[in-house]
Amino acid sequence: MFNKSAIVVNSLVKSVATQEGQLSILNGIDLEVKQGESIAILGPSGSGKSTLLGLLAALDTPTSGDIALDGVSLKGLDEEGKAALRKEKVSFIFQSFMLVDTLTALENVMLPAELAGIKEAKEKAKKMLDRVGLSHRLNHLPNQLSGGEQQRVAIARAFISEPKVLFADEPTGNLDAANSDKITQMLFSMNNESHTTLVLVTHDLTLANLCERQLLMENGILSESTPHKVHTTDEVS
């Protein structure tokens, strides 16, 4: 039973200026995610899914409304404060892996641990890479790794700092079916072990159905997709 909220969103609005005037991207989003809960956000391209994820992770600023992350309101934080909050509480997995090209797999995983002041970061990074089956790839650069291997490095990097909340933006989007299945199993296994709150954006209905809740984003409005699991015949692009 979940008691404490990991994320609370109230009346969240995001709009941007265009040549035609203000373009509304998010229209009054309300959301609560409990600690340890996993949710999937589905919806057509351009519906605002990734914009919402960026706001929740304190990577962007809303036009209005408020977000509380692990009990801390983002509204009163400057960029330095947001960066400190991200370092302490948040990890992110991207579709495009976002590894540092000039760093080895080991160094990429060590990086957030070193920034967070974690002792024995190197040894912990080695253990994380062993956990994702890459103990034989420690000294390889990203361009020497396959796409599946790069995403496994990214997963190890995401979990090394023991985040309160893990955000994943299309984590299997650049992978073939076999690697997608491996990454999915690894992500949920490690997430369950660490009891991390997981918020992911995906077009993959199999991945979405592994989450406890599925939310649908359409025209900047977020709603529970159904009271049951999403069906693979649902039209979600």
Image (cartoon, grey):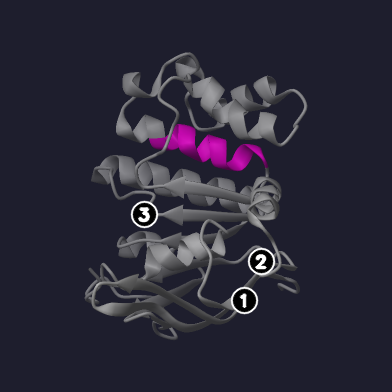
Which of the 4 image quadrants contains residue 36? bottom right
- Along the line of sight, which residue is nearer the eye, 63 or 34? 63
- Along the line of sight, which residue is nearer the eye, 73 or 121? 73
Numbered label attached to residue 66: 1
Numbered label attached to residue 74: 2
Give the CA distance from mark 3 to mark 1. 25 Å
Three-letter residue code for mark 2: Leu
Numbered label attached to residue 153: none
On the question of residue 57 being in view, the answer is yes
Three-letter residue code for mark 1: Asp
Which of the 4 image quadrants contains residue 147? top left
As helix, strand or loop, the secondary structure at mark 2 comes to loop
Three-letter residue code for mark 3: Glu
Q: Residue 183 placed where, x, y %?
A: 40, 43
Neighbor class of circle 3 (other Cα within 10 Å; few <14, some 14-19, many 20+) is some
On the question of residue 211 being in view, the answer is no
Q: Is residue 94 left or right of residue 86?
A: left
As helix, strand or loop, the secondary structure at mark 3 comes to loop
Let me know if residue 121 is in the magenta part: no
As helix, strand or loop, the secondary structure at mark 1 comes to strand
Q: Residue 116 placed where, x, y %?
A: 71, 37
The residue at which mark 3 appears reads as 170
Q: Check whether the beta carbons of the residues at disc 3 and disc 1 lie within 8 A of each other.
A: no
Residue 83 vertical placement versus 235 (above, below): above
- Magenta segment range? 151-161
